[in-house]
Amino acid sequence: MNSQPKTMKKIPWGKVGSYAVLIFLALLYVGPIFMLVNTSLKTMPSFMKDATSLTTELNFANFIEAWNKANFPKYLLNSVLYTFAATSIYILTAVFVAFPIARKYIKFSGAFLTLFVIALFLPPALIPQFQLILNLGLYNNPIGYIMLFIVNPIGIVILVNYVKTIPKELDEAAALDGCGYFRFVWSIIIPLIRPAIATVVVMHAIGIWNEIIAPTIYLTNKDYYPITRGLIVFQGVYGSNWPTLAAAVLLLTLPMLVLFLVLQRYIVSGLSAGAVKG
Amino acid sequence: MSYHFGRKKSKWTPYLLLLPGLLFYFIIALGPSMATAVYSLTNATGIKGATVNWVGLDNYREFLFMGRASVDNLAALQRTLIFSITVTLVQFTLGLFVALLVNQKLKGTNLFRTIYFMPVILGVVIQGLMWSLFLYPLGGPAAKILSVFGLRSEFLGGQPTEAFAWVIFIQIWANMGTTMMIFIAGLQTIPSDMYEAARIDGANTWQLFRNVTWPLLTPSVNTNLLLNIIGSLQAWQLFLVLVGYRNGTQVLGYLIYATGFGQTSGSTSSSFRQGYAAAASIILFLLVLVIGMSVQYILQRRERRILG
């Protein structure tokens, strides 16, 4: 079949074409980040003169200015606090919801699971949720804000599916050895389902961290702003000063990118879990 | 399933421990979600202590049929559909195409995957600000590229239809990675001997895709279609960050937020019309329900036909 000599090998057009498309698309993704970095290192006059030219100076003053003026340390601390508190409360309660449902240790397990699955289709809870928080006196209050994020129905579904892969004989053996229900879940099940927990925690935490609607609605006091809201306010004030704004955006982007590279596999496995379910 | 951890009183332990999580879900998510229907029949405001009256279907009537506002509302409804259809079609097709590309045995595919998936992590605010800079009309990169062809544009600050088109583009840019990842997960469940068998039978690349990949990818196809449709019908956050509440660009989700909480963020403006916004929420919900259920029905029939 292959009568051509080795040196005259056909050009693998499929490969070349694939790379061409992949690289073109990658430019669309890396381009905006590169523009951000480039702009953040420029001075305002040089940005005004030519926005896209490669920067010739390394003007790190933008970062210092952004850090000081944007009140970043405060906002960052708020974001960390909200994300950590809400995610911890959520995952602790979620495990004790998911485990008995997966094992059918409670009546109507199937119906309970359905309750969590239908959440995808339900009407947005925006308005009544606001009325609830308002009437509880928790409007513009960090506790009220955290409360909004202690539920996540998709996470429950992922946990239930993972618990089902743990052999049931384990429960029997532990019970025979006199292990109680709480201790069994706490010190045997939780370590065993750690991959699923990691996935759910990462997905949930990223959702809270990036949230912009809820802080706009619920938090009016600047001292309570998370970093996303702080950045939008900063844009409102420094909107035309792109070098400083770009530095502010980058200060927020870099930790997320690093975190992403570390946690990527958990996020991806969460997506796959959802896909298998569907 | 039999319960092993003790009898009598201790039989109730699972229920007791389940209770907090379940209560949270009912109080914070499920309850409020259902209550939207009730609120849609009232003239509730966002002001604490103000009286709330039943107004029947008035909110719906006003939303759909009364005056100039209803014309704008119906335009927003139409725009929501255009947004959803465009985003779903392009994101689905592109996501599948890219998944097929990076699923080949090529060097560097992991890097490409990571790059395409990155915006999902960065979140709406960073996505929006990044593109605002890239689309900077006074000599930004996009403006430079256009000027090569002798074109000019205001991008997000230009005509409403143009700003709207850019938001669609950025929405797809931001979420294509999720679609791609779900397809990759699906592709990896297809056993490779299926391809070998087909190749021995003399199938070409297109036939391989048509007769092996596409049918066996059905679960991911269904998941992605539903997620894309429902997600895009409800998405509006990028509009908030990129263009703000501008005439001629609003979609239903943004309209609900703006009428319920006032157009300017965080201020206690008088336009807190939460009963009305709840009615708009129910209209959006019905849209999601009808479209979602029909697509689900069609997909399931197709799945039964293909996978038996």
Image (cartoon, coloured by chain):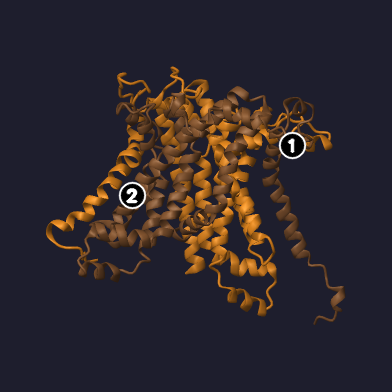
Chain colours: A brown, B orange
Which is more toward the observer, B229 or B65? B229
Q: Is residue A159 above or below residue A251?
A: below
The crowd level at tag 1 (other Cα within 10 Å; few <14, some 14-19, many 20+) is: some
Numbered badge on residue A92: 2
The chain containing the residue under callout 1 comes to B
Residue B98 located left or right of residue A190: right
| Residue at 41 percent of width and 23 percent of height | B273
Type of amino acid under label 1: Ala
| Residue at 30 percent of width and 22 percent of height | B53
The chain containing the residue under callout 2 comes to A
Q: Secondary structure at mark 2?
A: helix
Name the spot of residue A170 as percent of width and height, x first. 29, 69
Type of amino acid under label 2: Leu
Which is more toward the observer, B97 or A24? A24
C-alpha distance separating marks 2 and 1: 47 Å
Q: Is residue B229 above or below residue A218?
A: below
